[in-house]
Image: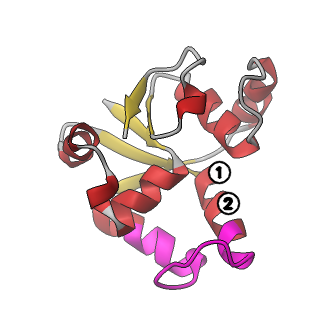
Amino acid sequence: MRLLLDTHVLLWALLDPDRLTARAAAALQDPQNSLFASAASAWEVAIKQSLGKLTLPGPADVWLPEACLKTGIGWLPVSAADALAVGRLVWHHRDPFDRLLIAQACDGMILVTHDDAFAPYAVPVLWA
């Protein structure tokens, strides 16, 4: 399976894996699954750290890429098609980062999240 990690799941996986459900933890550890973080999550993390709303072990631009590399989490770029697909989504959820993740997950990925706001969308979800 191709798993797209919501930003909070990415941070939990890297910093506090005990917060994950047993099912989500098992999926993230299964070597048959491919794990991805969206470039949108990197953007969100960088913004939150710069605003003082997120504390990380180091600067986001150094720590996050290194942590993802060490744990085998790949990066999913944001394409123009991804950005434009957001405009076709129903407005169940207004968070721009989450809406982009939903649009990206619609391309054959399973979104790993703990956020109930994803439920109304027609995207496969693995609840973390």
Give the residue furthest to the top: 122
Please indicate whether residue 103 sits to the left or right of residue 89 in the image.
left
Disc 1: which residue: 40
Q: Which residues are magenta?
A: 48-67
**Quadrant location of residue 5?**
top left
Q: In x, y percent, where is residue 86?
A: 75, 28
**Magenta segment includes 59:** yes
- The quadrant in which the N terminus is found is top left
Q: Secondary structure beneath disc 1? A: helix
Q: Dot 1: within a 10 Å radius of its alpha carbon, few (fewer than 14), some, or many (20 or more) residues?
A: many
Q: How is the image coloured?
A: secondary structure
Mark 2 in CB contact with mark 1 (< 8 angstroms): yes
Determine whether 118 is above or below 25 in the image.
above
Q: Position of residue 52 (x, y in %)?
A: 69, 79
Q: Residue at x 73, y 29 (%)?
A: 81
At 59% from the left and 54% from the top, the residue drawn is: 41
Residue at 69 percent of width and 32 percent of height? 82
Measured from the top left, where is residue 3 in percent x and y?
A: 38, 37
Label 2 – label 1 distance at C-alpha? 5 Å
Q: Quadrant of the C terminus?
A: top left
Q: Amino acid at mark 1?
A: Ala
- How many numbered circles are shown? 2
Q: Is residue 37 left or right of residue 91?
A: left
Q: Secondary structure at mark 2?
A: helix
Residue 67 position by quadrant: bottom left
- Left or right of residue 77: residue 72: left
Q: Which residue is identified by label 2?
A: 43
Give neighbour class at mark 2: few <14, some 14-19, many 20+ (Cα, 10 Å).
some
Q: Is residue 45 left or right of residue 63?
A: right
- Report if residue 81 lies within the magenta region: no
Image location (x, y in percent) of residue 101:
60, 37
